[in-house]
Image (cartoon, coloured by chain):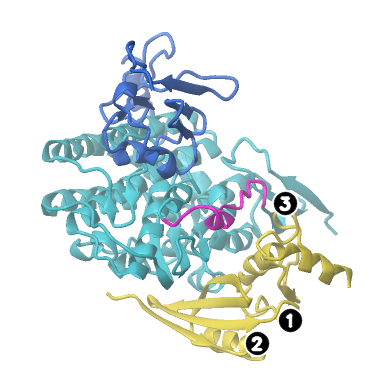
Amino acid sequence: MVDKQTITEVKVDELVDKAVLMKGQGYRLVQISCTFKDCFEITYSFDKDYELEHFRIYGERDEEILSISQVFFSAFLYENEMKDLFGVKIKDIAIDYQGGLYRVAQKTPFAPQKEEEEEAEHV
Amino acid sequence: MSKRSIVPFGPQHPVLPEPIHLDLVLEDEKVVEAIPSIGFVHRGLEKLVEKKEFTEYVYVAERICGICSFMHGMGYCQAVENILDIKVPDRAEYLRTLWAELSRIHSHLMWLGLLADAFGFESLFMHCWRLREQILDIFETTTGGRVIFSVCKIGGVRKDIDKDTLKGIVTILDKMQKELKELTDVFIEDYSVQHRLVGVGVLTKQEAHDVGAVGPMMRASGIAQDMRMLGYAAYKYLDFEPVVENDGDCYARTLVRIREIYQSMNLIRQCVEKMPEGEIEEKFKGMPQGERYERLEQPRGEVIYYVKANGTKFLDRVRVRTPTFTNVPALLKVLQGCELADVPMMVLTIDPCISCTER
Amino acid sequence: MTVLRFSTYVIKKLFQKPATHLYPIKKQKFFERTRGHVAIDIDACIFCGMCSRKCPTGAIGVDRTAKQWDIERLKCIQCSCCVEVCPKKCLSMENAYTAPSEGSVKDVFHARVPDNQPDR
């Protein structure tokens, strides 16, 4: 059996609709991962019968993203992790740890350019 | 009107192998809700990608967890090999499968021992681990280390196993199978064990799908999905079916794991029979460029490796999504409605590997 | 419904010898491939520094002018990368573990200088 994977780009506001569509078709949420390269690249992966579908959104540093944990409850851990480590602004997470999920010495350690981050916080 | 109280469970608890904290909301003796809190062993291993070259990162990836250590190394190597488009020689694939299945046996035996310890049956716990020592000795004979093997590299494996040692491994497993049968019969038939496991912590098929459970949690509720069917490493040449039970309680999960041990022994026998001669590694040149999602079946479930490379010797991003991370919401679901005395059993039944969860 | 199913197994094991062995009173036996610690044949070493470059943790230090090779024992992860990469094959992986220690242990090896060195 060959591993089929497709990556599609979606807009930030279409995200929750896509999640509802996936849930209706019987997909399960596999993972949410984040990379920072000039802007945030957040990938949501769904699986059904060994086929993976990835949806990728490109978000700016301060852009607010709506949580999909109302649709897929298990997404709350991934979104808290992204908030903690990368500083992605996600609102309405089902259980929100307010940045306290991991006990890290520095806030948002995986996000680059820390001086800019501190400036953004002070503003 | 019953009183609600909050009892903290963990991070230090005699039954937990690794620290996890749960805030249990209780009504009399029944758990109504549970709020997890993780982050006690966060080491930030994913950030080390900026400092270690991609050939050296295997050693970091192996050390994410001590129990599923080999499969982490294998997953990382497979992801990078796919990006670089290297074809690993067949003998190396068979050797990797052999070590992966041995890892699965040792992990499940360890879990059986911890489960026995969780309901107080300590002599059974010790005997399970005594059997596990034989597997660790096999690891030491073939790779040089009991827990961390350092045997997987990008392009193949670093050590070979000769024919006599392979036959020796099959003999040890045959001898172990008899002792294992006595041990697992206790789990399956003993009255006191059944009293603690049957009907406890039921997860129905629909709930397992909604909450996103993976691995034996999912297979014990009737969903037949096993990532080894994807055919990575040498699994495409081997003959097996996913092990499924339908009840969804703790007893079904125990049965799934026990049957997976026997299935792994069978897979190892098939591997040793079919192993071809040949090279054990493929040399490669160049830097990786691109990205890849690689899925493997660890003893605890499905693990996903996301590797993103940009053409230099330092990778952009490595992201490991381990199975226990996905099973935590399943744990919260299973905890609702159970008695306080059953909470340690529930936590153990997802096979928690917290160092994997938090990397 | 079976009760006390494990009892026959336990009674049988009561009369056999224990599965553990008394370490450190009895010496531990190691297997042939056990990765214990890195050893060097210092006279064959040419101080090229390949092992130091390949070491993933940076435990090895090589000084060409002083003809010194040192290894920080607690940083070494016994991966045998240095053993594989050495061009003169003077490094080997021994199968005994190093003794436990309380701080960082650095083992230093100096190459022997021959007695009659010509004047430069």
Main secondary structure along the magenta-highlighted residues: loop
- Along the polypeptide, which appears first: circle 1 or circle 3? 1
From the image, tell me which residue sits under label 1. Answer: A63
Chain depicted in blue: C
> Residue at the location (18% across, 48% down)?
B269
B1, above or below A51, in the image? above
Q: Secondary structure at mark 3?
A: loop
Chain depicted in yellow: A
What chain does badge 3 belong to? A
> Separation of disc 1 and disc 3 at Cα?
25 Å
Residue B156 in percent (x, y) is at: 27, 54
Q: Do the residues under discs 2 and 3 have CB atoms within 8 angstroms?
A: no
Q: Which mark is residue B136?
A: none
> Residue at the location (28% across, 39% down)?
B181
Horizontal arrangement in the rendering, residue A83 relative to residue B208 (left or right): right
Q: Is residue B53 magenta?
A: yes
Residue A48 in percent (x, y) is at: 43, 79
Q: Which mark is residue A103?
A: 3
Q: Secondary structure at mark 1?
A: loop
Q: Do the residues under discs 2 and 1 have CB atoms within 8 angstroms?
A: yes
Residue B244, quarter of picture? bottom left
Task: Check disc 2 and give the amino acid type.
Answer: Val
Highlighted magenta segment, given as a residue range: B39-54
- Along the polypeptide, which appears first: circle 2 or circle 1? 2
Quadrant where the N terminus of chain B is found in the figure: bottom right
Residue C40 seen in this snapshot: yes
Q: Colour of chain B?
A: cyan
Q: Which mark is residue A12?
A: 2
